[in-house]
Amino acid sequence: MDVFIYATISEEQEKRLEELFRIVFPEEEIQIYRTFDDFSKKLKLSGQVGSVAVLAPGNREQLLHLLSKRDLLRDFRTIVIAPDREDGTVAIAHQLRPRYLTYLNGDFGEFAAVLRKITAVGNSLNGGSFLPH
C-alpha cells in the first residue's frame, strides 16, 4: 500500500508534517508533492486500490481545485488537512469524503494515530508493506 502526500502549505508547516511522517514511518522514504500535476501523475501510476492520499492544501482555492479533481481520488482512502476551520472550508473538505479531517493548526498526534491505523488496515487487507512515494 502506498501513501501519497500533496501539500501546498508553508515551508514551516510542511516541515512539521514531514516530521510527523518520519515518526510514523521512520524507515520509509517520504515524498511530498508540491504540484498537483506531479501528485496526479503518481496517483495514476499507482495500481493499488485502497492506498492513502493525504491532502494538505495551503488555502481554500487549492482545496476547491482538489474538489474539482475528486474523481482521481475515488479509489484512495483520503485524509484532508484543511487550511482553516471556517465553515465554508470545512464544507468543501467534507465533499472530498475523507476518512479523516484535521486542520493545519490541529493536533497532529491524533492525526499520527489515525494514519497508523489506516495504513495498518490497508497493509493487512493488501498483504503488502507500506511504501510511500
Image (cartoon, rainbow, N blue to C red):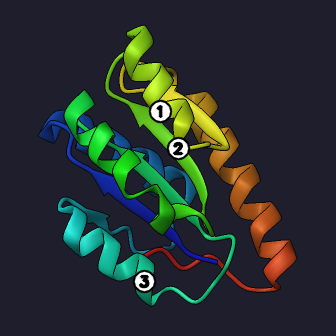
Asked whether, in this view, residue 51 is left or right of residue 86, the answer is right
Which residue does the numbered mark 1 point to in the structure image? 93
The image shows residue 90 at horizontal and vertical percentages of 47, 21
The image shows residue 121 at horizontal and vertical percentages of 82, 62
| Picture disc at residue 96 | 2
Packing grade of label 3 (10 A; few <14, some 14-19, many >=20) is few
Label 3, label 2: how many angstroms apart (C-alpha)? Answer: 18 Å
Are the two marked residues, 1 and 3, in contact with CB atoms closer than 8 angstroms? no
Q: Observer-nearest residue: 69 or 76?
A: 69
**Quadrant, the C terminus:** bottom left
| Picture disc at residue 55 | none
Q: Residue at x 26, y 64 (%)?
A: 33
Residue 59 seen from this side: no
- Identify the element where label 3 is drawn: helix
The image shows residue 94 at horizontal and vertical percentages of 56, 32
Packing grade of label 1 (10 A; few <14, some 14-19, many >=20) is many
Q: Is residue 83 above or below residue 58?
A: above
Which residue does the numbered mark 3 point to in the structure image? 44
Q: Observer-nearest residue: 117 or 103?
A: 103
Say what amino acid the circle numbered 1 marks: Ala
Q: Residue at x 80, y 82 (%)?
A: 126
Residue 58 seen from this side: yes
As drawn, the residue found furthest toward the left would be 11
Q: Observer-nearest residue: 30 or 26?
A: 30
- Identify the element where label 1 is drawn: helix
Say what amino acid the circle numbered 2 marks: Leu
Are the two marked residues, 2 and 1, in contact with CB atoms closer than 8 angstroms? yes
Label 1, label 3: how many angstroms apart (C-alpha)? Answer: 22 Å
- Identify the element where label 2 is drawn: loop
Are the two marked residues, 3 and 2, in contact with CB atoms closer than 8 angstroms? no
Looking at marks 1 and 3 on the same chain, the residue that comes earlier in the sequence is marked by 3
